[in-house]
């Protein structure tokens, strides 16, 4: 009876602690034991009813036998039954409960798959009894608002739970691939406003400037496309692809009219557009660049296809030094970095609902532009202001937590 009780107890723990996603994988690979276990777990009420029926029978039978033995060995001792019960309790605790359940928790597949074969047969034999018991059990659960047939054990992983799994999978994939997967999971919540180049950092051609200055800017520009506007970016007239203009720039008749003839129509993107939606829009419109506008139509920034891809692949596209980890565990961070990118690099959870950049987050937190050398604790992370100018924070140092 101790052995039977150990089997039922251990197999119960093993079957209930099986990794459901690994189990599905093994089912796809046609693993016979996994197939049996998966079928049993589709109706956990029946499986548990069968296991507990067998376990209760073994325990009660063992207790009855122990009582009979104690009375026969020591018929005149009034405490013989209590002594027998104490010995049985210790024996069952060690051999029938803790040991098999610990083994099952460590190696669930070792017990679960062979047990699944046995339970499949036993369920057919004892189904009338199990069904009768489950009839009352399911009725009680329904009174509590729980439907056994909903298979609550089969609940899908949430996005946050999936992120935790990816973050903890350090031994299975390089860190850069972890960041790529986390970036893909964040696409649903990210908007173009989160990743755009801010208005004050947009590099473009002002047609009000002399042609000589424009030519020099074209020759020295590190970008492949430039916004072309008159006086300010709100008066944009189009985008200029430098590959087209460089072939004409040395001609004698090259002037501003030549530039105007090479411009492509500007694309305007609402700031609330999701990143994944804009990727599809770029593909549909056969465009790689657009201006981000707010609800009033004012230009807030610029976004490119490279920016969208970098949201997924991150550092694979660029050698980004905006957040550099130091030897003492601290981080030297450019305050223009987006909060989302900083979270991705450091695995922190700074809020992303408000300001989009670290500079904005610090200013919102302090309600002023901090002085050089100021130390604060930003949402649990101590930092020091290393560099600033008149209206923005430029460089900060995040100190390691003690």
Image (spheres, helix red, strand yellow):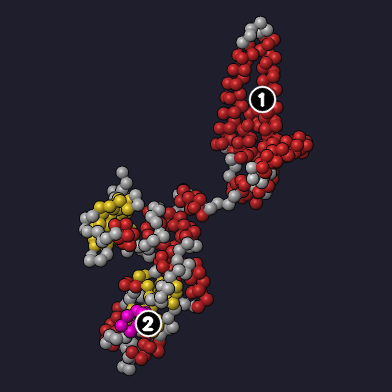
Callouts 1 and 2 close, C-beta under 8 Å: no
Q: Foreground residue, 58 or 170?
A: 58
Q: First in sequence, mark 1 or 2: give its number.
A: 1
Whether 230 is among the magenta residues is yes
Instruction: Specify the principal SS of the magenta part.
Output: strand
At numbered mark 1, what does the secondary structure look like: helix, strand or loop?
helix
Specify few, some or many for label 2: CA neighbours under 10 Å numbering under 14, 14-19, or 20 or more.
many
**Residue 111, how many percent across, how many down?**
63, 36
Q: Give the position of the N terminus as an image quadrant.
A: top right
Q: Foreground residue, 29 or 11?
A: 11
**Residue 374, how many percent across, how many down?**
23, 55
Please report the bounds of the magenta region as a residue range. 227-236
Image quadrant assignment for residue 104: top right
Relative to 69, is 125 above or below? Answer: below
Whether 322 is among the magenta residues is no
Dot 2 corresponds to which residue?
236
Dot 1 corresponds to which residue?
59
Q: Can you name the residue that lies furthest to the left here? A: 372
Q: Can you name the residue that lies furthest to the bottom here? A: 253
Q: Foreground residue, 221 or 13?
A: 13
């Amino acid at each position: 009876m101790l052995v039977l009780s150990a089997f039922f107890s251990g197999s119960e723990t093993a079957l209930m602690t099986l990794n459901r996603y690994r189990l599905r994988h093994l089912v796809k690979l046609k693993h016979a034991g996994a197939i049996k276990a998966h079928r049993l777990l589709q109706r956990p009420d029946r499986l548990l009813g069968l296991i507990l029926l067998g376990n209760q029978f073994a325990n009660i039978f063992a207790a009855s036998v122990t009582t009979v033995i104690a009375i026969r060995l020591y018929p005149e001792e009034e405490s013989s039954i209590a002594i027998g019960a104490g010995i049985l309790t210790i024996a069952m605790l060690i051999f029938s409960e803790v040991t098999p359940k610990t083994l099952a928790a460590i190696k669930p597949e070792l017990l679960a798959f062979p047990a699944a074969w046995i339970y499949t047969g036993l369920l057919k034999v004892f189904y009338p009894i199990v069904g009768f018991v489950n009839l009352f059990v399911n009725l009680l659960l329904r009174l509590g608002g729980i439907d056994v047939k909903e298979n609550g054990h089969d609940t899908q992983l949430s996005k946050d739970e999936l992120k935790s799994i990816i973050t903890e999978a350090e031994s299975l994939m390089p860190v850069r691939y972890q960041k790529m997967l986390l970036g893909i999971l964040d696409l649903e919540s990210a908007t173009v406003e989160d990743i755009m180049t801010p208005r004050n950092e947009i590099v473009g051609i002002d047609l009000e400037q002399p042609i000589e200055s424009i030519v020099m800017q074209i020759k020295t520009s590190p970008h492949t496309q430039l916004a072309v506007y008159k006086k300010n970016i709100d008066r944009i007239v189009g985008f200029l692809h430098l590959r087209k203009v460089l072939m004409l720039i040395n001609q004698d008749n090259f002037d501003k009219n030549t530039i105007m003839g090479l411009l492509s129509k500007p694309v305007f993107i609402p700031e609330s557009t999701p990143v994944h939606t804009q990727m599809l829009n770029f593909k549909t419109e056969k465009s790689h660049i657009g201006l981000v506008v707010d609800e009033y139509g004012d230009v807030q920034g610029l976004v490119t296809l490279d920016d969208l891809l970098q949201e997924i692949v991150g550092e694979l596209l660029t050698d980004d030094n905006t957040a550099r980890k130091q030897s003492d565990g601290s981080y030297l961070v450019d305050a223009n970095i987006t909060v989302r990118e900083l979270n991705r690099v450091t695995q922190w959870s700074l809020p992303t609902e408000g300001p989009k950049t670290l500079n904005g987050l610090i200013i919102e937190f302090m309600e002023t532009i901090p002085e050089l050398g100021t130390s604060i604790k930003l949402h649990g992370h101590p930092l020091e202001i290393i560099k600033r100018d008149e209206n923005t924070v430029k460089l900060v140092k995040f100190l390691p937590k003690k």
